[in-house]
Image (cartoon, rainbow, N blue to C red):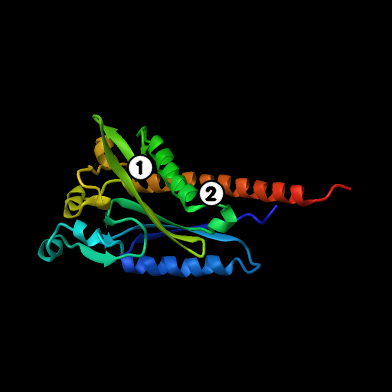
Amino acid sequence: MSEAMRLVVEDLGNRPYADAYQDQAHRHEEVLASRDGRQALGYILLVEHPPVVTISRRASSKDHLLATPALLASRGVEVCETDRGGDITYHGPGQLVAYPILDLNRLKLGIHAYMRLLEETVIRTLAAYAIAGQRDTTATGVWVDRAGTLAKVAAMGVRVRRWVSMHGLALNVAPRMEDFQLIVPCGLAGRPVTCMRDLLGSAPDMASVKATLVSELTGLIREAERAADAKVADAKNEATPLT
């Protein structure tokens, strides 16, 4: 049985996107270093960003920024390039962003399985508030059915370097929803976006949502860890010659 992964949860508060990226990069290096015989380590960083549009390096992403520089300035919205996957996304106060910095080798998770883990985290978090979140087979993220139309309530975008994850998920709790009109969210034209406040009729307590999401995410990481340990144990048993 390998050593249990030590998970550290850090709430960064309200932090500019570039600063939070540096926090991610530092934690990424620490997780990589933990592979060298030291205690297995992972981080879950929580943050709310000041209003910002993040644009991936995908060639078409810049085409999905609809607002002029003047309009962005009037709304106080920054624009940042990002190295995560996906397309274009808005972040702002009232949106809960979680950046898990995890050794996916240790958890024996491929990228597809890891993305499903993030989606399941949000689905379980929403269920705690009697919101039925679901997947869309055509698009990453978590969605809710509004009168027969799927609306996105949480976006996902990750980067994996040396099999340690960065970036993560953004759950719309009670953000300034009109700012999503500045972009084509995630590059998906005609797909509506919603938030927990609009679905519930009032905004849930952010601290409560954070606690629920951390509990669900931690639980799923531990499930993956136990499954990974079981695979290693099975492989060792198969390799042990009978005497």
- Side of 151 relative to 164 (left or right): left
Mark count: 2
Q: Residue at x 70, y 49 (%)?
A: 235
Q: Residue at x 66, y 56 (%)?
A: 3
Looking at the image, residue 74 lies above or below residue 113: below
Work out whether residue 49 or residue 2 is closer to the camera in this orientation and state it.
2
Looking at the image, residue 33 lies above or below residue 84: below
Residue for badge 2: 221
Work out whether residue 41 or residue 83 is closer to the camera in this orientation and state it.
83
- Side of 119 relative to 193 (left or right): right
Mark 2 falls on what kind of element? helix
Q: Residue at x 20, y 43 (%)?
A: 190
**Which label belongs to residue 122?**
none
Work out whether residue 75 or residue 142 is closer to the camera in this orientation and state it.
142
Q: Position of residue 141 (x, y in %)?
A: 35, 45
Q: Position of residue 99 (x, y in %)?
A: 42, 57
Looking at the image, residue 156 lies above or below residue 27: above
- Looking at numbered disc 2 in the image, what kind of residue is underneath it? Ile
**Which label belongs to residue 142?**
1
Q: Position of residue 40 (x, y in %)?
A: 60, 61
Q: Categorize mark 2 by other alpha carbons within 10 Å: few (<14), some (14-19), many (20+).
A: many
- Looking at numbered disc 1 in the image, what kind of residue is underneath it? Val
Where residue 144 sits, quadrant-wise, is top left
Q: Position of residue 217 (x, y in %)?
A: 48, 47
Q: What is the distance, in whole Å, between disc 1 and disc 2 at their CAs?
A: 18 Å
